[in-house]
Amino acid sequence: MKKVERASIIRVLIDLIKADNVIDECEMALYAKVKQEFNISREDETSASSMTLADAVMNLSGSSLQLRKSLMEVVSKMSVSDGFCAEQEAQLLLALYFCLSEENIGMSEVYSVHEPEVIIDDNQVIYVESAFDENINSDIEKNYRSIDKEFRLAGFNFIYIPFISNHYRNTELELFKEIAKFLAPTIAEDNIPVLVKHLQNITTAEYCSEQLCNRLGIHNLRDVPPSLLIKISSTFVGDKLYTNFLRITIDNDVLPMTQDIVDKYTGMLSAATRFVKSAEESHGQFMYHGFYKQLFDIYVLQRGVKSGILLDLIKGCLFLPELAVEIAGFHRRDKALYILLLIESENGGLDFSLPKTAKEKLSYDNRIKSIQNKYSIIYQALNGDKKNVPKLDDPEIRRPIISNIRRCINKLSDILHNVNDYNVCKNSYGHFCVNIPLERVYVRESGQDSDQIHLCNSLLFNKLKRVR
């Protein structure tokens, strides 16, 4: 057995023992027996203390089938060693089942998030996707009532974003305005219709990108298939508190899958099934509880304004049109790279990673050449001299540019909603990107202030598309 596997086993067992906030004598006796069986050393326990649950599960998912089966037997025994399997223990067992069992391997993941303000309540099951899937959404809409009730029987709240945004669309605008003014009297009344419209039209993919990826930092959800995301536990790693989530890929009809999850989970519980009461919608009422409240607080009682981006090639500036503010502090080289990042983020971002083998060298050279050519076109469009275009393949030149972009964008945190959306980050592949959808980026290429078009319809964009 590998050292990392031993440490991963300990991490799982520690989380399981602590799950119900009671450390039982029987659990410790079984823990000592497991350490002896798997030849666990004190060094392994030390390594486990700095490992997240997500890392542990990922390490174990690549281990042998025999080890995974042995671990599942151990955790099943430990969960009832004190005579009672609590909800938190059952949720962790559910995660291990879907991530480590042979029939589910590769279909599920655990994420561990170190974020003081987790925007998801306990026992919430959220439908997530990075792009709209017509078949899955149609299936959920058709079976929503049954899916919702199945999860309620197990003590979970099922969250389907389109269902909630539809509630806000059916709320009379005047009532919405009065409630917004009542809950947040400092909001400018002229801004309320814009905020309301956003809340009424939010999509699952948008929520995943803005809140789960950018705000919580679950970057794996940037390109995720239709799935169910379940908050399962909170655990300390060292002195830092991490919130753990289980993601289960939807690979068949949603209702049978929901029933399978609920059956597995309730079968692990020692206590009787409990019902979760929830207020039902009715005419003339405004839902302000649970996930309804979470979305309202995020998008209406938000700090700052959500804005598009305008590239003004006449003035050579970048603006936030909804705020009528220029992004200050950018040099020409910064503006050119920022625009290139906005464009290339749709295709996975900019990859500057060096080749590791001679075989990768040709691919690297072609990739860097394409990046440099596109950068040069944008730089010249901003009235830069072709002879003085910075060389992006040189990290000593590239790093200060990226650093200044980040510094300037961070200064806008008091006026921009979710400033991290606008800043340079690295995605799960290690590529540089900016998480603003390209449809929210505009350009002005002619002399009239009113001549603003989507960047994708611009002469500049068409010129860049021809670069290989």
Image (cartoon, rainbow, N blue to C red):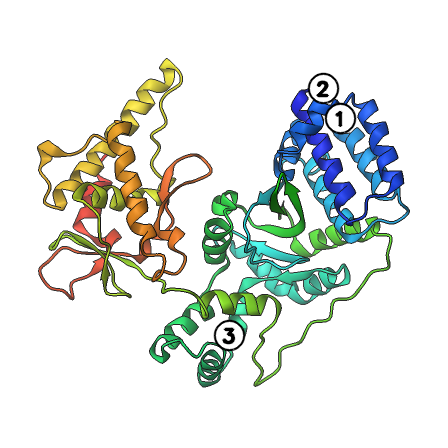
Residue at x 64% of width, y 64% of height: 144
Which element type, helix, strand or loop, lies under badge 3? helix
Disc nearer the start of the sequence (2/3): 2
Disc nearer the start of the sequence (3/1): 1
In this picture, is 337 found above or below 259?
A: above
Q: Amino acid at mark 2?
A: Met
Which element type, helix, strand or loop, lies under badge 2? loop
Report if the CB atoms under discs 2 and 3 are less than 8 Å apart: no
- The quadrant in which residue 309 appears is bottom left
Q: Is residue 393 visible?
A: no
Q: Position of residue 228 (x, y in %)?
A: 62, 52
Q: Is residue 308 visible?
A: yes
Residue at x 39% of width, y 15% of height: 357
| Residue 41 vs residue 362, the one in the foreground | 41
Q: Position of residue 48 (x, y in %)?
A: 67, 31
Residue at x 16% of width, y 66% of height: 450
Q: Is residue 464 left or right of residue 271?
A: left
Report if the CB atoms under discs 1 and 2 are less than 8 Å apart: yes
Q: Which residue is mark 3?
A: 168
Report if the CB atoms under discs 3 and 1 are less than 8 Å apart: no
Q: Position of residue 28 (x, y in %)?
A: 84, 36
Q: Amino acid at mark 1?
A: Leu
Q: Amino acid at mark 3?
A: Tyr
| Residue 114 vs residue 163, the one in the foreground | 114
Which element type, helix, strand or loop, lies under badge 1? helix
In this picture, is 264 found above or below 191?
A: above
Q: Nearer the viewer, mark 2 or mark 3?
A: 2
Q: Which residue is mark 2?
A: 1
C-alpha distance separating marks 2 and 3: 54 Å
What crowding class fits label 3: few (fewer than 14 Cα within 10 Å), some (14-19), or many (20 or more)?
many
**Residue 67 - label:** 1
- The quadrant in which residue 102 appears is top right
